[in-house]
Image (tube, helix red, strand yellow):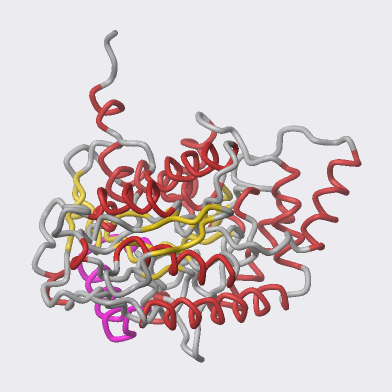
Amino acid sequence: MSLSQVASSIPASPTIALNEEARLLREKGEPVIHLGIGEPKNKTPITAILSSAAKLASGDVKYVPTDGTPSLKKAIVRYSEENYDRVVAPQNIIVSDGAKQSLFNILFTLCNPQDEVIVIAPYWVSYPEMIKMIGAIPVIVTPEDGSFVPGFNEIERVVGSYTKAIIVNSPNNPSGLIYPEDLISKIVDLCERKGIYMICDDIYHKLVFDGKVAVPACKYTQKDVENSKVILVNGVAKLYGMTGFRVGWVIAPKKLVEIMTNVQSQTTTCVSPVMQAAAEGALTGMQSIVESLRLSIQNNRDVLMQELHSFTDVQCVKPQGTFYALPDFKAYCRNSVAKNSVELCQFLLKKALVVTVPGKEFGMEGHLRLSYAGTVKELIEGIERMKWALDPNAPSEIYIGDRKLVRDWL
C-alpha cells in the first residue's frame, strides 16, 4: 500500500490514544482513574443547551455561512470587546470546528513549505505536528534554565528569514504557567517590528488562579486588528466545559480570515448550526458558570499540590491557570521501573490503572502531565496509587477497586 509520507509520519494524538485505552479498560470493568484528559466534569451551561435545543427543534438545520453564523459572530464581537478591549468587525472573525481547527487553518493559510514557526516548550502536543503537516518546520525553544518560561533572548535568537509565526499559549498547556507580561510585550514588539505573526492560543485565558490575570497580547500593540500581527484564537471548550461541541474562532485581519474561509469551505464547509447556537448561548448567557468552574478547578489544583508534596522525589511548579500540572518525575525515569516518561506512563497504567501523559510529548522528557479537571476523589486516589507504585516510602499494600495489591518491585 502506497501512502503519503507526510500523513504516515504524523503520530496519533497521545491524549486521544490514552483516552481510548482508558475507555477500553473501563469497558472491561477496570477501575481506571484518568489524570490525562483535559475535560472539566461540569454540566453544559443551561443557556447553551436551551439555545441548541431551540435550533434543533426548529427543524431548520441546514448549511450556514462558512465563517460562522451572524448571531454567533455578533456574540464573539461583544466577547472580544469585554475581555480584550478590542474592537473587531464580523469580517475579522471565522468560526471553526474547535480551536484546534482554527490553529490548523491559520498555519495552513500563513505558511509555505520550509517556512518556520517558533514553538515554546513545554508546548501543546499538536503544535509541532500541525506545522509539519503543512510542510513547515517547527523551531522549538526550550528554556535553558530548566524552567517553563524562556528568556526573550532565547526566542529572539532563533528568528530568521524563514520565520513566519510564533505560537504563544498562556496560560500554558501543559505547565499551567502564565507568561510574564514583560515577555508577552517583548514578543509582541518583536513580531510587529519583524512582520512575524503572533498566534495567541487563549483557550484558557480566564481559567486563572490566585487573583492572577493572563494579560492579552493585543494590549501591547498600538495597531488595530486589521494591521496588527497579533492573531487571537479562542473557543468554548475549556471556559464553559463544552469540549464536545467543537466550536472555536479566530480574530485576525480580514484578508487572512477571507483566505481561511476559503480553506475551510473546501474541508469542513461550516460548523454545525446546532453547535454554533450552543456556543452563542454560552457566550450570551450568565457568565457565573465560568467563575464557578474556575473556583472548582483552583480547589482541585490545591488538592493536587498537597498530594504531590507528600510524594518522595517529585517536584512541581505550582500552576497559575488551566487545569494541568507538569511535575518532574525524573527520579523515577532512571531505574528498573522506567527509562523515560513514556515507559513511566505505561507502567502506571499497567500497575496502578492511572492514566497520565508523558512529558516527552510536550517537549519535557522526565515530566508527566497531570490533569486536575476531574473530581477531588479521583485526584486523591490517583496520586495515592501513583505513590504506591513508585515511591518506596509509601505503604506496599493498596486496594484498587475491590482488589488488594502488594507492591513487589521496589
Residue 180 left/right relative to 241: left
Q: Is residue 295 above or below residue 402?
A: below
Q: Is residue 56 above or below residue 228?
A: above
x 42%, y 64%: residue: 397
Quarter of the rendering occupied by the C terminus: bottom left
Q: Residue 10 appears in which quarter of the rendering?
A: top left
x 56%, y 67%: residue: 88
In the rendered structure, which segment of residues is drawn in magenta? 178-199
x 63%, y 70%: residue: 79
Magenta segment: does it hold 386?
no
Instruction: Pinpoint residue 83: horizontal percent, then vertical percent.
Output: 57, 77
Q: Evaluate whether residue 226 shows in this view.
A: no
Q: Residue 40 appears in which quarter of the rendering?
A: bottom right
Magenta segment: does it hold 193?
yes
Q: Along the line of sight, which residue is nearer the eye, 69 or 43?
A: 43
Q: Evaluate whether residue 394 shows in this view.
A: yes
Instruction: Pinpoint residue 161: horizontal percent, then vertical percent.
Output: 11, 54
Residue 255 left/right relative to 138: right
x 30%, y 43%: residue: 129
Q: Along the line of sight, which residue is nearer the eye, 69 or 15?
A: 15
Q: Main secondary structure of the magenta part?
A: helix
Instruction: Pinpoint residue 68: horizontal percent, then vertical percent.
Output: 64, 47
Instruction: Pinpoint residue 193: horizontal percent, then vertical percent.
Output: 22, 71
Residue 31 left/right relative to 407: right
Quarter of the rendering occupied by the N terminus: top left
Q: Along the line of sight, which residue is nearer the eye, 180 or 74?
A: 180
Residue 31 left/right relative to 240: left
Work out which residue is located at the far right of the displayed protein and give it.
58
